[in-house]
Amino acid sequence: MTVHTSFFENVTRYVDQAAALTKYPKGLLDQIKHCNSIYSFEFPVRGREGEIEVIKAWRVEHSHHKLPTKGGIRYAPEVNEDEVKALAALMTYKCAIVDVPFGGAKGAIQIDPSKYTLDQLERITRRYTHELAKKNFIGPGVDVPAPDYGTGEREMAWIADTYMALNPGQLDALGCVTGKPLSQGGVQGRREATGRGVFYALREACASLGDMKKLRLQPGIAGKRIIVQGLGNVGYHAAKFCREEGQAIIVAIAEREGAIVNPSGLNENDVFSFRKETGSILNFPGASSLADSKAALELDCDVLIPAALENQITSENAGRIKAKIIVEGANGPTTPEAEEILRENGVLIVPDIYANAGGVTVSYFEWLKNLSHVRIGRMGKRYEQAAELRMMRMIEVLTGNKFTEDQLATAAKGPDELDFVNSGLEDTMVTSYQRLREIWKTNQRIPDLRTAAFYDAIEKIAKAYLELGIFP
Ligand code: NAD
């Protein structure tokens, strides 16, 4: 039996469960839960033959307790208002958990991007941006979009250019959107940030001896058998870092057209190139192919990383999931009913509102870079390099030994933008995990990490509202 519940209602259920453990009045909790502004609109574009097509789109700002609001833009044929509201709400809680000072938002255009030419996609994106600007739903201090499912750097550059054309001379205009190409005010490391964050999340989860013992797993990522669903931005990079930096084994990859399996390990890079060449991951050399993509979620593994879309693990398939750890790269991949089954089966779920927060964390760094108008680390790199070199020379004097040129170059490098971004991202993911685990383990009424994450977010948002007061 398939249970059709609203995605926004699912998020609300999670919020209610955590809110019941706090001491805040109902009215305040209602204000936290509801979407503050919902802009639903339609606009025309010209098709290939010059015909007019009406396009449906949304921007939802879930919470104005901190501004600007922040959240990606999704291009998908099935997207609807309920989904955008849910995704906007998740952004509010996510930002609170990783201490990024934004309210949550999300946008969507109801199209299948593969059905449009590049020129049409550009016109759709620019018109969408213009509609947002008309209603004050975009701006560096108002609402700052980013990439999501179906969009990337290309769309973000069009959005930035349109906004700048509409706001000539606005000094901070580049901060109106994040996830831009590097040459257009983007920041190093943003493209891979969500996947890198998923890797740090899994690494932290696997670092706890007690939690791993309970799951009958060895501590550490090395050797863990991982299944990834979705080889897009999040799934590809999560697989890459888990394999390259964590020495995990990617035993299966599931995509729209089916799944491929190789217990000895898949290289996501080769699979990506193969799919680009042939249009499918199926028949990838050395792997067996599964026509039923979703069946791959139920294969034997240690870790499952759903990184495609919401509602993938439901009450229908949850009981057959063999993974002991699920790290939610996608937003909302597990329904509340599935969560109950998985919890009873002892599965550790690292929830979306923490696990995929790496993207918004590095978007925050990009926004800061745009507002400060200088590349991160530009002022200090050479100074720090010189200081490191002085320290190395001092060691040579004290020990009477000489470093080789290679050793000096490696040790006295001076940090560049990517070093700072990754350091900030790693610190954010590590400290946030430790705080959530502490909340989970020290409060008997909190059954899992997801409830701990919502609890943490509600505490922070409620505090902000109480300090600010209610206008007027
Ligand atoms: P993307 O468009 O880059 O990739 C999604 C991939 O999933 C595509 O390769 C697509 O073919 C595949 N896919 C679609 N349906 C599938 C199915 N039924 N089974 C298997 N694969 C399927 O999107 P993305 O940016 O990687 O986003 C993926 C998820 O991560 C979404 O839930 C998104 O909201 C979430 N997320 C993304 C970011 C980000 O920075 N991009 C940040 C946080 C959360």
Image (cartoon, grey):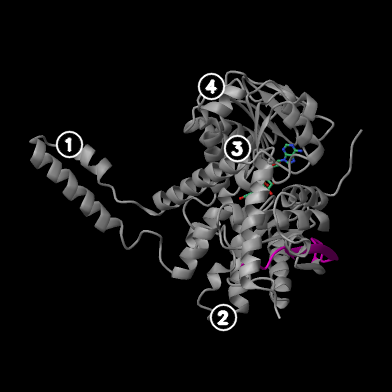
For the point 52% across and 64% down, which residue is it?
Answer: 367
Q: Earlier in the sequence, mark 3 or mark 1?
A: 1
In the image, 378 versus 453, the foreground residue is: 453
Instruction: Report, in whole angstroms, how far the alpha carbon at label 1 lies from the one at label 4.
Output: 39 Å
Image location (x, y in percent) of residue 185: 49, 63
Q: Depth-wise, is mark 3 or mark 1 nearer the camera?
A: 3
Vertical side of 340 occupied by 388: above or below: below
**First-in-chain label (2 vs 3):** 2
In primary-sequence order, the first of circles 1 and 4 is 4
At horizontal 19% and vertical 48% (from top left) the residue drawn is: 389
Label 2 vs label 1, nearer the camera: 1
Give the number of the mark in front: 4 or 2. 4
Which quadrant contains ligand 1? top right
Q: Which numbered disc flags the more N-terminal residue, 2 or 1? A: 2
Question: Disc 4 vs disc 3: which is toward the camera?
Answer: 3
* Foreground of the two, 320 or 277: 320
- Residue of label 4: 218
* Bounds of the magenta segment: 46-66
Vertical placement of residue 186 versus 9, above or below: below
Labels in figure, total:
4
The secondary element bearing badge 2 is classed as loop
> Which one is in front in this view, the residue at disc 1 or the one at disc 4?
4
Between disc 2 and disc 3, the foreground one is 3
| Residue 18, image x, y percentages | 72, 48
Q: Quadrant of the C terminus?
A: bottom right
Say few, some or many: other residues with alpha carbon within 10 Å of mark 2 (under 14 / 14 to 19 / 20 or more): few
Say few, some or many: other residues with alpha carbon within 10 Å of mark 1 (under 14 / 14 to 19 / 20 or more): few
